[in-house]
Image: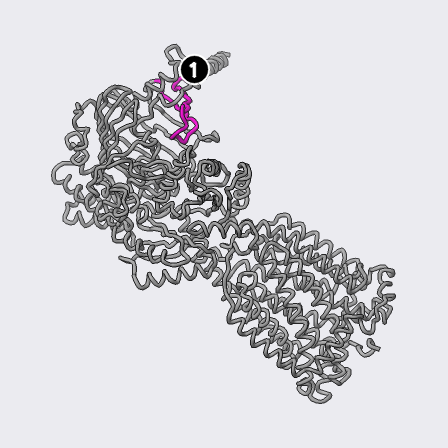
Amino acid sequence: MKRKILDFPLQHARLVFIGLAVLTIGLGSAIPWIQVDTDPETMLSEDDPARVFHNETKEEFALHDLIVVGVVNEVEPEGVFNPASLARIHQLNQQLKTIDGVIAHDVLGPSTMDNIEQAGPGTIRFEWLMERPPKTPEEALAIKEAALRLPMLRGTVVSEDGESVALYVPIESKDQSHRVSEEIRTIIDGFDASADEFYITGLPVAEDTFGVEMFKQMAISAPLAALVILLLMWWFFRSFALVLSPMIVAMTTVTITMGALIASGFTVHIMSSMIPIFLMPIAVVDSVHLLSEFVDIYPKHGDRKAAIKEVVGHLFAPMLYTSLTSAAGFLSLMMTPIPPVRVFGAFVALGIGLAFVLTIFFVPAYIAALPEKRLAALLTSKRDADDGGFLGRMVESIGAKSLRYSKPILVLTTAILAVSAYGITQININDNPVRWFKESHEIRVADKVLNRELAGTYTAFLVMKQDTDAEREIVAAGDDALEGASDAVRSQWDGLKADAHAASEEGATNVSDALIEATSDLSFDSTGEESEQWQAVQTALEEAQTGSKTFQNPEHLAYIERLQQEAEALPLVGKTSSIADVVKTVYRELISGEEKDYRIPDSTEGVAQTLLQFQSSHRPNDLWHLVSPDYRESAVWVQLKSGDNQDMMAVKTDLDMFLAANPPPEGLRAEWAGLTYLNTVWQDEMVGGMLESLMGAFVIVFFMMMILFRSPIYGVLAMIPLTITIVFTYGLIGLVGKDYDMPVAVLSSLTLGLSVDFAIHFLERARSIQAETGDWRETMALMFQEPGRAITRNAIVIAIGFLPLLGAPLVPYNTVGFLMAAIMAVSSVVTVILLPSIMMQIQNWLSPKGEKAATGANNAPAPLATNKEQTI
Amino acid sequence: MRTLTKTWLAALAAAILLSTPTMSAEAGDLKDASEIVNRTNTAQYYAANDGRALVRMKIVDSKGRSQRRQFAVLRRDKADGGDQNYLVVFDQPADVRGTAFLVKKHANKDDDRWLYMPGLDLVKRIAASDERTSFVGTHFFYEDISGRQPEEDKHQLLETTDTEYVVKSTPKSSSGVEFAHYTLYVNKKTFLPSKIDYVNAQGKVYRRIETVKVDTVKGHPTITRLKVSDLDSGGYTLSDVSNVEYDMGIPDDIFVEGSLRNPPQKWLR
């Protein structure tokens, strides 16, 4: 079977090439149909309760995702409150409304907000805060004073210190925010040069801009990594034609996998955009093993087909194992509850399988098809095939030393593990899409400045609602009022109810409103006792309806007020806003305009009439962002100065404790919504899910190792480098204080797959060499020849190859670049230095005297090596 | 042959009949846009010398959620197209019952407006600002209810069809208005507007007021159902007018602050 597989590419090279070309072009042609989805919301499945509630809340309170545009002036003594700056802000405010995709009537800014104030004794005035830009410095200051008096604006539209202004731009959908922010930028660029600084930020911009940058990076970072890898391999293997083959394997693997993903109808999420970056090293690793050995063996054989056969014969089993374990690591991601992570895991696993098949079929066919002169360089190479050049001598000497100092090495490893374990306990689980950009990125800068100036650009909503069915209760009140009425009246009432239900089904009214109107008409049109009866029903219905308006009730508003005080006492909360603030502000202006009257009126009617006045402004609908029109649901806006998940969680924990200690009145229920909150939900699932899948994968890989090596001891040995690598890299993350975020979480599966690679190659080769030599010391000496070189070359190629990622403006790419290098370095060092030491220590267990071990090794799938000859 | 001639004649007759509407301007048509707008103003806001009506407004948002407002209106004119007084007393929803507005509308200066809130036992003057604020949370503006002064706009007769005048009105000052212009469709017989389209600076119609139903009460054509739509958000308000009465002899002395707390029930019912 294996022999057939090995012979096939050598005999049918052309078939392999054509097959690969067809597959690549066929699936690759799907790539132009790519659909990008950078919305972190999709990290939660569509029916996730938190996501469902978040979207219900957005719908209920007509909430849109907001782009925040801040204007800061550090030069003028009054900040932006001077005629020239306000003229620019006014122009910007008006032009924002004309941008396609902006919800014009909900744009918040000084020119589109109302001012409510006293206009002389006993007089109240509603007017635009800034209908036109001020002409004098005094007028500019008057606008500032007016805005600072309005709690809804203070800290939000105008900074607390009265120097900066922010505009809030609601957009129809998140995926337009990058384009809209670019258009805003164009408007700003059109302004004359001045000391005004404009900043654009907000979660949707960060998320959407990340998507745009991400694709730039896919076009820059991934190919750049490929180029560096190519150059490194060229340096190692001296034949450009030869090293082209791993590149072709990597490129076609990425193309086919991404094509398959897109053709299957999946959107390319932040996660799946990383597939090329992940597949590249995995695809290259196998081919580098293959080439590395080929380059060492070929000069001795001179016959390339024989050389290839021998190399593939050696490597088939370890390559199969490493592919299986890597695939297992990624397939374990299918166990997480996060859809994009599942897609990512599945397609990376698919890519790994593909890379294995291509390495086995394509690389041999490619080498076989190369013109003779291309390989001539290998034969005439100055490099001494015996010691593999400088690298070879280094590996050999390190190997020799590691055997001599095996005890200190073991002690050192234990110490490093202990420190790393401590580091792991220091790991900080946190994420924030804005932090996916480097600190110098304009979004990060804007985020920093605006959260310093304003009450916070991150919003979460605490939604309070009453669960009872108000409509039914109101109708029941009508039923009660008619108790003891004549059958005729009661059947007329039943008719009214049926009509009211029908009318409410049609929309544009609800049952209670329709019944109140109908009974009002009946009492008006009838006389005597009948009129009184309908009047009584109407009164009962009205009372029940008024009573159902939970958030016109002063007691409930007072509870919200307390909740807000509690929230605002938290250092991370810049500000909260609720219907209570609106009621108190309008009431203050209705009564005296003085601070002492900044309070909630004493009666439900007082609240209702105060709100009726608010609704007589230019923006009556602003009320419905805070309360539902039936006053049964209300949203408290919580503005946070940080979008870090752990900060959001801290606020939530504190307020949940308050809610538990001070239960809301009459069965009110509180629930969280908002993008900032939603991010914490999927993070929670992600971290938990990743940990579970990592554990699962660890166990699976362990069993696979024991089965593949048919030995528990080899199984344990194979797990050592990967365990140390994982503990070390995550310990390092904890120690340097890097947040454990989405990219880091996903890298754990890659760590597992890649770091077991070297161990498999090492153990498999060591065992087959030992089977021939029968002596572990000699075996190890041979292991530091060609197998050690292959591992070292591989580690260097991947580690250096991914360093260009450190230059990307996106932090997740930097993280991948750094961790990839760390994983390669640690797992190769551990494999080459530590494994031999351990194996020497326990050599009696590995091959308890003679034949048993020897036969066991002979049964292993790849005992074809004639390594002894090679080294002669 | 005979049938063919018949068919031909019928077709000819039909062609003549159909072509009639396009021959618009008739001898009696008005040519002056300002006069048309003045007569519209009078027909809509100054019918008879005084009047009473019960108004029910239904506010429907883009999600189909509804609210109600119900109030009685008393009106007395000083002169057609000139000053007039209004008293508005709310009945629904029950929690705003008794809330009242008194408006002394002036043709040449800002209106005087008072407000009474029984729940706060408070009478308050409302200072003049622009009149394009919401009328108690409906999609109507205060100005839609009280009437916009014709002199505030320049009027241009765009078209005269056989039933309507189409007038484009452009504000003389852009201060306090959110539209660039509006187009008024006026019924030639009743001089009531059948439709008003408000156009923004981008040339887009974003707001529309439509007359849905007209009834003639005591010889006065009266709009009894009016709809205003916010075309941006998809919300609308429907206003139904009933119990209309004209020339009741409502005295001038009920339009005083005292009536806010103690509405004159005699005239309201």
Colour treatment of the image: one colour
Does the magenta run of residues contain A156? no
Whole-percent x and y of residue A263?
62, 52
The N terminus of chain A lies in quadrant: bottom right
Does the magenta run of residues contain B167? yes
Q: Amino acid at mark 1?
A: Ser
In the image, A112 versus A223, the foreground residue is A112
Name the residue rendered at 44%, 30% in the picture.
B200
Question: Do we see residue A849 in this rendering?
Answer: yes
Whole-percent x and y of residue B195?
38, 26
Magenta residues (range): B160-188
Q: Chain of mark 1?
A: B
Where residue B108 sits, quadrant-wise, is top left
Where residue A765 sits, quadrant-wise, is bottom right
Residue that protrudes farthest toward the top in the picture: B27
Q: Which residue is mark 1?
A: B24
Q: Is residue B91 left or right of residue A561?
A: left
Whole-percent x and y of residue A312?
76, 69
Whole-percent x and y of residue A622?
37, 43
Helix, strand or loop status at disc 1: loop
Instruction: Characterize the local packing of mark 1: few (<14), some (14-19) or many (20 or more) Cα atoms within 10 angstroms.
Output: some
The C terminus of chain A lies in quadrant: bottom right
Question: Do we see residue A1 in this rendering?
Answer: no
